[in-house]
Image (cartoon, helix red, strand yellow):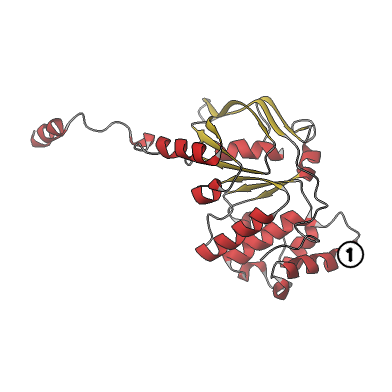
């Protein structure tokens, strides 16, 4: 389904600007007082309309992207979204950036679809919110579920509702953190089609290399560093090579088959 240009894919959304990381890094102190680095100081300027971020679980890719919505601030360096510093102008940044999570239940706050979308429209006069929310839900195929309890929607319907609620606020930038991970094949294709059609700048964290290949630019994150950055074919190729070895958590194996056999017979 193609979103009408008068609604969620509205040309009223602000034009894409620069997303800038200036030596931005993130460290945390664990329960034993040890400092852990989640993201080493990173410098990037993202102006492309479609950017994909790939990497192994725990690599730091979500940390990198969460810096862009102002809810996570860097412990070193700075992050700017359309010229707004996320540390000083966090509230304004969150007016520019929308965030779509892997699990829609983590961000659906209201009991019905109509109420959830209307919440995102709280900048409108109260009398206009319900009519606008109704129109938006009808355009994405959820018009028959306005008053249905959110808890009874399918997983795909919940993600579609979450996307509709985020876009109702007309952000200039959409951050999508593994938005199709929990979806079946049909719903995954549907949500990806909607995301691909948006006029907003979209930065997507994903394990789906087919989806990443449709981006204009791909970042590969490993152990808290951006280790590849470029055109999809090159960056995804580098990622495949990086993932070709055994998981680092496994540690070294036996020195040789002979030593293992000897040990077993002792």
**x then y, percent, for residue 168:** 77, 57
Residue 107 visible in this rendered orientation of the protein: no
Residue designated by label 1: 128
- Does 113 sit left or right of 226 as displayed? right
Q: Quadrant of residue 50?
A: top right
**x then y, percent, for residue 28:** 58, 29
Task: State the residue in front, 99 or 236.
Answer: 236
Neighbor class of circle 1 (other Cα within 10 Å; few <14, some 14-19, many 20+) is: few
Task: State the residue in front, 132 or 192.
Answer: 192
**x then y, percent, for residue 29:** 56, 28
- Does 154 sit left or right of 111 as displayed? left
Q: Looking at the image, which residue sits at the far bottom?
A: 144
Residue 222, above or below 110? above
Residue 104, above or below 51? below
Residue at horizontal 14 percent and vertical 30 percent from the top? 259
Q: Quadrant of the N terminus?
A: bottom right
Residue at horizontal 53 percent and vertical 27 percent from the top? 36
**x then y, percent, for residue 52:** 58, 43
Q: Secondary structure at mark 1?
A: helix
Task: State the residue in front, 20 or 197.
Answer: 197
Q: Looking at the image, which residue sits at the far left?
A: 265
Total of numbered circles in the picture?
1
Residue at horizontal 51 percent and vertical 51 percent from the top? 210
Q: Quadrant of residue 73?
A: top right
Residue 50, above or below 221? below
Q: Quadrant of the C terminus?
A: top left
Residue 161 visible in this rendered orientation of the protein: yes
Q: Quadrant of residue 15?
A: top right
């Amino acid at each position: 389904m193609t979103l009408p240009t008068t609604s969620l894919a509205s040309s009223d959304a602000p034009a894409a600007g620069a997303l800038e990381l200036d030596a931005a890094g993130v460290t945390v102190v664990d329960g034993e007082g040890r400092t852990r680095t989640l993201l080493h100081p990173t410098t990037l300027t993202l102006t492309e309309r479609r950017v994909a971020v790939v990497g192994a679980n725990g690599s730091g890719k979500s940390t990198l992207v969460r810096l862009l919505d102002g809810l996570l601030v860097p412990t070193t360096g700075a992050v700017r979204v359309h010229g707004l510093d996320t540390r000083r102008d966090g509230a304004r940044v969150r007016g520019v950036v929308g965030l779509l999570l892997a699990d829609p239940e983590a961000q659906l706050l209201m009991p019905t679809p109509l109420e959830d979308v209307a919440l995102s429209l709280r900048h409108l006069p109260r009398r206009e919110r319900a009519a606008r929310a109704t129109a938006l839900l009808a355009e994405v195929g959820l018009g028959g579920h306005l008053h249905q309890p959110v808890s009874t929607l399918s997983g795909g319907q919940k993600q579609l509702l979450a996307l509709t609620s985020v876009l109702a606020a007309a952000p200039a930038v959409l951050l999508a953190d593994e938005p199709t991970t929990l979806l079946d094949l049909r719903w995954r294709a549907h949500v990806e089609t909607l995301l691909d059609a948006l006029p907003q700048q979209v930065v997507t964290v994903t394990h789906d290399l087919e989806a990443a290949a449709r981006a204009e630019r791909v970042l590969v994150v490993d152990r808290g560093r951006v280790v590849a950055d470029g055109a999809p074919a090159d960056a995804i190729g580098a990622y495949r090579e990086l993932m070709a070895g055994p998981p680092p958590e496994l540690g070294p194996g036996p020195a040789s088959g002979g030593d293992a056999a000897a040990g077993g017979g002792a």
